[in-house]
Image: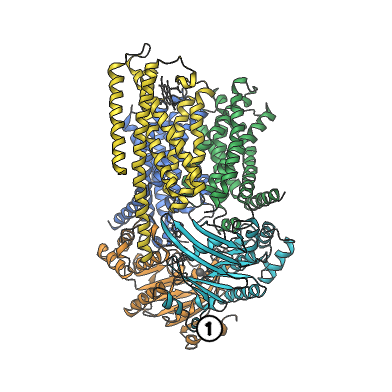
Chain colours: A cyan, B green, C yellow, D blue, E orange
């Protein structure tokens, strides 16, 4: 069973098609980098996979089920532009909340475990409001990984992060892929993405121009794909 | 069971953040007092007529101050895109809605219990003549207001002009509940029972609560998922 | 073709209205108590009938939109609400003028009048909400939900004369009273007027839908242009 | 000269964005009508007493509806960090403040001119008995409200809980201007002139305007630069 | 006369010193890349240079004058995280407004000129609200460059931009440096920054750890600086 299968997706904002006739399949254990210029439709695609938007036409299946099915929603983790944790709660409270929301067996343990893995255990009881940007981002990562999701949906996860934070995120993603999870991430920072990506998809003005294993050319020259399949 | 637990998780989260900062609660209570003072300039609080207005003034205060709390309800999910995190989680939209409604209901009740005695003192009013009935009316009308407010908070959460739109949209919608509550509260504060003629108001409130709660619970999922 | 039918129906509605006016002004006799002014009733009530119909259809279209997610329902919904609002204003104006003459004041706060005003505010709120959402799909969805909630006010307005004691007259139409409160000749012309206004409203809705569709097209063309930029 | 041009540039910009969308204007006007309806439930509009409350009710409506506009004033600079762009530009803080105040003043006056006749019709009131004096009171009190509102809008613009804080802060501050306006408007609507006793209110308003305008103009630079 | 001189700057948020004892000088025509990990104080420093924040101690001089002096403020351009243009106005109206605000001689001409240079002339009369992310960012660049500022202060200007938008911004910055303007920009995208930077400054936890001409080592390996002067 594929992790993600997308068939004939169209998404309109009004009459403008932000995504047209998108078909692709991501097998379990793959790491897909979703590339494309500003406004190509990456965020729209990811939000649709996460069940935050509904397509007007076409079918999305995650692990063979509808993406709004309650079980499906428990099986993926989302990391968008916002960090998705509450400023007025402490790091610990935030993680415990999401552990409960995801019906994790032992919320307390899971929360403590992930605080440790993101090196936030020494500030577990501090309010998120007082965190610096890097700390917040790490907590957001902990939140998204907390319930050991089978599928990770990440929208520009490297944006505005420093080298250290990027390295942490990359190593966590590598672990996740190693345990068989599937990753789909959009990004403009091709170099960081190429370290992980096994597959690449290119969107241009809402159409899927390329989808397949990462071309070797991209390791040398990340913009190769744009030049070959994009609009130059 | 599961649904109930999810509802309570959300309600507990909202109440916990609110207790942590007490921001909307403090603001709403002090706003309530400010409005009471403003009203006392507009109407003469020592006149006899004030008795007939008491319920009306009180609910106006609750409505204005309550809007501050209702306004924040979904807005507090916005700052860090928490709403996306919740909507994409396994919690169903209806549990999210009910959880928030319960939290708002509790907060509104707190505002009401704090402002009632203040109102009593400022306007020289005894509101303990029919405590049970009054409590029943408070609960029913507050729930009605909460449901409308929470639903519209969800409806307007992604709007450019949320703070502007919300008051203009919710007050007219709340009017049936408010009208009934005003009328009944005036009767009860003045120590009378509810005459047969005025039972229509009780039915109005109950109907309002039932109809709008079911509507909101059915429609909220559609509102939250784009 | 669609255009021609529209103009045709519009023309018929107009002619029908002129004919009704002739009947009302020159054929019908004055009423015993109120004198000449009662004739405004023959516009007052049809205006409200038209506006309630428009709101009902808007509500139905909203439900359909939420089920089918087809933007044409949304287009119908705005058009119907806008036309409905126009007739609400006509109803308020005719009522006010009548009140001025019969009661000596423009306005009084009885349940019927108040709820008519609240309905007017609520549906203006609907138009405001639409204005504040940029994404047409989200706009359609949110306003459909609002439209469904709004319909409650129409029901209350309609039932208010039964629920409360009002200064506004109670039911007179025979469909509500079982007959006897109104002269059949007057009632017949009232219904004829209602038919004329409904036809007129239908034409207005169609025209507004046209404009709305064009605007949607223009909007999407602009987005195409921007995507290319 | 340069200062004046800068003030007008800002005022023109705000008015232009507002005319483009008409959002706050529409919202404020329909909110005003909503409040008029709400008040009609609270106080008995057909009673004789209503005459003595007319000014009070009217200014409560203006204050509540006006807050929507004042609330947006600096908030509209936030969405794209436009405030930073303006504060770091050569425009002095005082010109920025005055420009915004002028724009708000115009918008508030529009709201008032639209809601006065509606108020007159709904509450069966003739407000044209002393048009000149009434206009003078409107202008003076509205300017006072505008100055306070705009200044506090600037003060709270970066606060987490802007929508919450603003109403709780501005109404108490506005009370002198509001009280005076309520009293004077009641007198003028009822067709009386201003008796010698009540001249104190006129002086209060004028003093309020002068003092708070100068305070705000001096202090705004400090408020805007962190 | 130096473009920017910073002497003994301290900036506290409450008790926490976000910047401590910062001294540096940027000469005219230099392009300084302000580097540092998340929370190092880059944004704080740039906002202080732009006169949006006041230091608690120390003196900042731009072209020898105080940074809040009206003439000084007319001589620099700022580009922060937000785009700083109004959604309800058209592209043209926005630029005309800022041209007036900066007392540019011929507002109309300047606005048209910059719309052309950022390739927005065909949408001059469309409301910004309808723009895509790339278009907005270009308009923001036009706004910041409109009055030919002598000094440009840019906070993470490359964030979330695609390759084409980055190229445009880089070429505009090169032009500006060529005509003698000074540039100070903060960024995490070292590679993009190194194409332009003549000088580099490194902040670590509010202290200036390095300031000088760009080390040659950084061309090969952009993170060299972090490893040598940072905290590893
Ligand atoms: C601004 C003032 C008024 C408003 C807002 C108003 C509103 C309404 C509304 C909403 C209806 C319902 C139509 C329907 O049931 O289909 C109605 C019906 C009617 N109105 Fe008015 N009205 C006003 C003034 C008046 C006055 C002054 C009179 C006469 C003294 C009057 C006489 C009637 C009558 C006879 C009906 C038909 C009642 C029925 O059979 O349902 N209205 N009006
Ligand atoms: N809410 C919305 N309403 C209307 N149009 C939208 C909306 N969101 C996105 N769009 C349009 O849909 C298209 C795709 O947008 P999307 O945000 O998915 O692009 P993206 O690939 O994520 O771009 P970026 O790299 O800038 O994040 C764009 O043309 C955008 O203008
Ligand atoms: N308004 C504020 N109130 C309190 N502390 C703040 C505030 N702004 C920044 N800080 C703190 O000051 C320090 C420097 O923040 P600053 O935003 O300047 O860092 P930065 O270098 O821009 O980081 P980034 O790369 O994440 O943008 C951080 O520790 C931050 O937590
Ligand atoms: Mg995106
Ligand atoms: Mg920063």
Along the line of sight, the residue nearer the viewer: D47 or D28:
D28
Can you give x and y, in whole percent of width and height, for residue C176 in the image?
A: 49, 21
Q: Residue furthest top?
A: C32
In this image, C217 relative to E225: left or right? left
- If the image is split into quadrants, where does the N terminus of chain A sit? bottom right
Chain holding disc 1: E
Quarter where residue B204 is shown: top right
Can you give x and y, in whole percent of width and height, for residue D115 in the image?
A: 39, 35
Question: Considering the numbered disc 1 on the image, is that residue within a helix, a strand or a loop?
Answer: helix
Relative to residue E6, is residue C175 depicted above or below? above
Along the line of sight, the residue nearer the viewer: B122 or D48:
D48
In this image, E49 relative to C204: left or right? right
Residue D211 can be seen, yes or no: no
Q: Which residue is mark 1?
A: E225
Can you give x and y, in whole percent of width and height, for residue B144 in the image?
A: 59, 37
- If the image is split into quadrants, where does the C terminus of chain A sit? bottom left
Quarter where residue C12 is shown: top left
In this image, E150 relative to A104: left or right? left
Q: Residue at x 57, y 53 (%)?
A: B76
From the Cβ of disc 1, is ligand 3 less than 8 Å away? no
Neighbor class of circle 1 (other Cα within 10 Å; few <14, some 14-19, many 20+) is many
Relative to residue A93, is residue B133 depicted above or below? above
Q: Residue furthest bottom?
A: E216
Relative to residue D194, is residue A227 depicted above or below? below
Along the line of sight, the residue nearer the viewer: D117 or D209:
D117
Q: Residue at x 42, y 83 (%)?
A: E198
Residue B215 can be seen, yes or no: yes
Query: How many numbered marks does the figure carry?
Result: 1
């Amino acid at each position: 069973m594929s992790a993600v299968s997308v068939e004939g997706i169209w998404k309109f904002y009004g009459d403008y098609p932000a995504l047209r006739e998108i078909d692709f399949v991501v097998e379990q254990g793959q790491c897909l980098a979703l590339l494309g210029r500003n406004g190509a439709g990456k965020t729209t695609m990811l939000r649709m996979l996460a069940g935050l938007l509904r397509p007007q036409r076409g079918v999305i299946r995650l692990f063979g089920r509808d993406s709004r099915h309650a079980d499906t929603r428990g099986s993926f983790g989302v990391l968008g532009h916002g960090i998705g944790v509450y400023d007025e709660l402490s790091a610990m409270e935030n993680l415990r909340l999401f552990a409960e929301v995801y019906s994790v067996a032992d919320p307390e343990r899971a929360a403590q475990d992930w605080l440790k893995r993101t090196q936030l255990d020494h500030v577990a009881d501090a309010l998120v409001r007082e965190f610096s940007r890097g700390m917040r981002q790490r907590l957001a990562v902990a939140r998204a990984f907390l319930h050991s999701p089978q599928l990770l949906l990440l929208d520009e996860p490297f944006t505005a992060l420093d080298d250290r934070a990027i390295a942490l995120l990359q190593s966590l993603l590598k672990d996740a892929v190693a345990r068989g999870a599937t990753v789909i991430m959009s990004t403009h920072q091709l170099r960081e993405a190429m370290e992980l990506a096994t597959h690449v998809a290119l969107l241009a003005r809402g159409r899927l121009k390329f989808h397949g294993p990462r071309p070797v050319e991209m390791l040398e020259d990340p913009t190769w794909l744009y030049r070959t399949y994009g609009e130059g | 069971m599961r649904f109930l637990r999810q509802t309570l998780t959300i309600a507990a989260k909202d109440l916990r953040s609110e207790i942590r900062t007490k921001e909307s609660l403090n603001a709403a209570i002090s706003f309530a007092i400010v409005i009471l003072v403003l009203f006392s300039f507009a109407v003469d609080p020592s006149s006899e007529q004030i008795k007939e207005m008491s319920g009306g003034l009180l609910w106006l205060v609750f409505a204005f101050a309550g809007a501050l709390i209702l306004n924040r309800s979904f807005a507090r999910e916005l700052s860090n895109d928490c709403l996306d995190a919740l909507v994409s989680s396994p919690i169903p939209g209806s549990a999210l809605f009910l959880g928030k409604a319960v939290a708002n209901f509790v907060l509104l009740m707190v505002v009401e219990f704090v402002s009632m005695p203040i109102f009593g003192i400022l306007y020289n009013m005894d509101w303990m003549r029919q405590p049970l009935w009054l409590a029943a009316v408070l609960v029913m009308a507050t729930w009605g207001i909460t449901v409308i407010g929470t639903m519209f908070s969800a409806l307007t959460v992604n709007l450019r002009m949320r703070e502007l739109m919300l008051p203009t949209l919710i007050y007219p919608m709340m009017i049936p509940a408010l009208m009934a509550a005003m009328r009944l509260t005036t009767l009860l504060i003045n120590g009378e029972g509810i005459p047969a003629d005025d039972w229509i108001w009780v039915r109005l409130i109950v109907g309002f609560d039932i109809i709008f709660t079911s509507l909101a619970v059915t429609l909220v999922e559609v509102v939250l998922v784009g | 073709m669609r255009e021609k039918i529209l103009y045709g129906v519009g023309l018929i509605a107009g002619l029908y209205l002129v004919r009704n006016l002739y009947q009302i002004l020159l054929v019908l006799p004055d009423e015993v108590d109120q004198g000449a002014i009662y004739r405004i009733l023959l516009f007052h009530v049809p205006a409200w009938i038209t506006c309630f119909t428009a709101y009902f259809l808007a509500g139905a279209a909203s439900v359909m939109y939420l089920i089918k997610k087809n933007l044409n329902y949304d287009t119908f919904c705005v058009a119907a609400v806008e036309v409905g609002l126009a007739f609400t204003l006509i109803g308020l104006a005719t009522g006010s003028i009548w009140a001025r003459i019969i009661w000596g004041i423009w306005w009084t706060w009885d349940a019927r009048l108040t709820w008519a005003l609240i309905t007017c505010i609520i549906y203006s709120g609907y138009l405001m909400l639409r204005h504040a959402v940029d994404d047409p799909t989200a706009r359609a969805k949110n306003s459909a939900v609002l439209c469904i909630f709004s319909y409650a006010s129409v029901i209350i307005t309609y039932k208010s004369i039964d629920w409360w004691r009002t200064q506004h007259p109670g039911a007179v139409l025979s469909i509500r009273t079982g007959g006897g409160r109104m002269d059949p000749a007057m009632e017949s012309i009232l219904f004829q007027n209602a038919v004329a206004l409904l036809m007129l409203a239908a034409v207005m809705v169609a025209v507004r839908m046209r404009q709305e569709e064009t605007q949607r097209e223009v909007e999407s063309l602009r987005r195409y242009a921007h995507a290319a930029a």
